[in-house]
Image: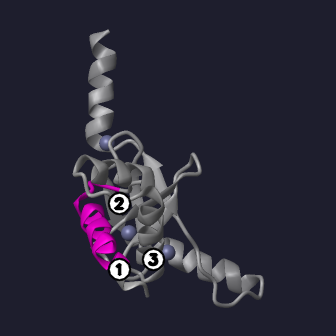
């Protein structure tokens, strides 16, 4: 592990925990740039990949194929509900999904099955705001 990059990684970890929901490396880099930290985009990428690999951050792909990261409060396996408008993220357990995935995998003779299930949508507040907007027109 390169010691000289430790403070940068710490700074990225901090910025990630302050973020509201899932963020891309670019977004986080822009935040850090406003604070004049001098941390480059490549370093942000590396730090995020390291945090994700070490289980300190969750990573997922948005429907647009963008890699997003978040420092989740729930350790271990869980799923997410993500507002595609404001980024609000809810961590959810999904017992039905766990059982279905196990059953489906073993029905096909698969073992050690893993899955990634995240739900993107509009949160209640964004839905209400959109409805109000529509009513005003
Ligand atoms: Zn998570
Ligand atoms: Zn929202
Ligand atoms: Zn699951």
Q: Is residue 35 magenta?
A: no
Question: Percent from the top left, x then y, of residue 55?
Answer: 41, 81
Give the label on residue 4, or none.
Answer: 1
Instruction: Examine the rendered structure and indicate whether residue 61 appears above or below residue 74.
Output: above
Residue at the location (55% across, 69% down)?
116
Say which label, 2 or 3, has the lower sequence index.
2
Determine whether label 2 and label 1 are within 8 Å by CB.
Answer: no
Residue identifier under label 3: 50
Say which label, 2 or 1, has the lower sequence index.
1
Residue at the location (43% across, 79% down)?
77
Real-space Cα separation, disc 2 to disc 1, in angstroms: 12 Å
Residue identifier under label 2: 39
Determine whether label 1 and label 3 are within 8 Å by CB.
Answer: no
Question: Percent from the top left, x then y, of residue 40?
Answer: 41, 58
Coloring applied to the structure: one colour
Q: Residues within 10 Å of mark 3 (few under 14, many from 20)?
A: some
On the rendered structure, is 109 left or right of 92? right
Nearer the observer, 7 or 136: 7
On the rendered structure, is 118 left or right of 64? left
Question: Percent from the top left, x then y, of residue 114?
Answer: 59, 80
Q: Nearer the viewer, mark 1 or mark 3?
A: 1
């Amino acid at each position: 592990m390169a010691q000289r990059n430790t403070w940068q990684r710490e700074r990225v970890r901090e910025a990630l925990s302050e973020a509201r929901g899932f963020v891309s490396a670019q977004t986080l880099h822009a935040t850090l740039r406003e604070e004049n930290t001098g941390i480059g985009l490549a370093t942000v990428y590396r730090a995020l990949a390291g945090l994700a690999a070490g289980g300190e951050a969750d990573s997922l792909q948005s429907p647009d194929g963008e890699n997003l990261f978040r420092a989740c409060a729930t350790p271990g396996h869980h799923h997410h509900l993500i507002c595609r408008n404001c980024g609000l993220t809810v961590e959810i357990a999904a017992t039905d999904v766990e059982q279905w995935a196990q059953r489906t995998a073993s029905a096909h003779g698969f073992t050690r099955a893993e899955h990634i299930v995240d739900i993107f949508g509009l949160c209640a507040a964004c839905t209400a705001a959109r409805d109000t907007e529509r009513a005003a027109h």
